[in-house]
């Protein structure tokens, strides 16, 4: 059973059209949930860490929220430069030092 | 401010050949990781290290070996490459467990 599931797999938005990406997780104890951005041909770039349900973090047009079962990455009035693959990952209690990653949502923002 | 540097960036190997991927970080991070990324599979942990001289197995360690002789370097070795090891390999580092990683730009490896 997948521990981290991201949806949708791909999303196409018009510039200015706000939307949300979903990351649902099934772990016994969450120590942290991470969001990364990955551009083609590059390594993932760290965006946010969320540690407890109800927590929110913001950066420019991005806002990440966390519940006990899922996290959302809200994108407000996106621009073409927001086009990328967005990855989420969880750090599980008792899972050692590793992060478990989802397969990502590929976002394309068009003019 | 190089961060995490991976060499080489691209490599083509024949089945059975060996090679070493080098990861170097200049942030004095204790933790270092090797992941592979395959379409539809997400990032999967191969091996990791929690400090100089230490290594541990991750989710998919078979066919790979690692060494961390110096704190700033983490080497990933393939002793006898197989086509199933065709992938993009990412190295990452962090100053502690459970904090955001800094990733390198990746090595694209093709085994023919």
Image (tube, coloured by chain):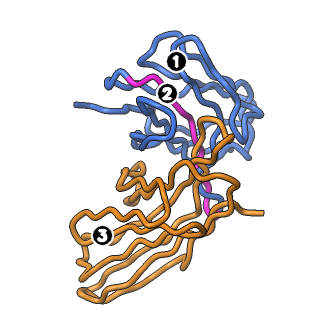
Chain colours: A orange, B blue
The percent coordinates of residue B5 (x first, y second) are: 37, 31
A94, above or below B41, in the image? above
Q: Which residue bears the numbered disc 2?
A: B31
Which subunit holds the residue at mark 3?
A
Mark 2 surroundings: few (<14), some (14-19) or many (≥20) residues within 10 A: many
Count of marks placed on residues: 3
Q: CA distance from mark 3 to mark 2?
A: 28 Å
Secondary structure beneath dot 2 equals strand
The tag on residue A62 is: 3
Query: Is the C-beta separation of discs 1 and 3 under 8 Å?
Result: no
Q: Residue at x 69, y 43 (%)?
A: B85
The tag on residue B51 is: 1
A85, above or below A7, in the image? above
Q: Residue at x 65, y 36 (%)?
A: A96
B48, above or below A42, in the image? above
Query: Is the C-beta separation of discs 2 and 1 under 8 Å?
Result: yes
The answer to if B38 sits in the magenta stretch is yes
The percent coordinates of residue A80 (x first, y second) are: 25, 76
């Amino acid at each position: 059973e997948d521990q981290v599931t991201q949806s949708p797999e791909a999303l196409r938005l018009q510039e200015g059209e706000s939307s949300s990406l979903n990351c649902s997780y099934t772990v016994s104890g969450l120590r942290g949930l991470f969001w990364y951005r990955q551009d083609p041909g590059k390594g993932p770039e760290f965006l946010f860490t969320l540690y407890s349900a109800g927590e929110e973090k913001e950066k420019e047009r991005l806002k990440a929220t966390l519940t006990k079962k899922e996290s959302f990455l809200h994108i407000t009035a996106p621009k073409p430069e927001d086009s990328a693959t967005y990855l989420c990952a969880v750090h599980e209690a008792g899972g050692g030092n590793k992060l478990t990653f989802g397969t990502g949502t590929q976002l394309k923002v068009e003019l | 401010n190089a961060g995490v540097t991976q060499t080489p960036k691209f490599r083509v190997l024949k089945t059975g050949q060996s090679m070493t991927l080098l990861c170097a970080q200049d942030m004095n991070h204790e933790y270092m990781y090797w992941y592979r990324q395959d379409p539809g599979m997400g990032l999967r942990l191969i091996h990791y290290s929690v400090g100089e001289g230490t290594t541990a197995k991750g989710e998919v360690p078979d066919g790979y070996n690692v060494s961390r002789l110096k704190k700033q370097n983490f080497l990933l070795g393939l002793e006898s490459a197989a086509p199933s090891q065709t992938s993009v390999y990412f190295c990452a580092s962090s100053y502690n467990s459970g904090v955001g990683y800094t990733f390198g730009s990746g090595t694209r490896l093709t085994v023919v």
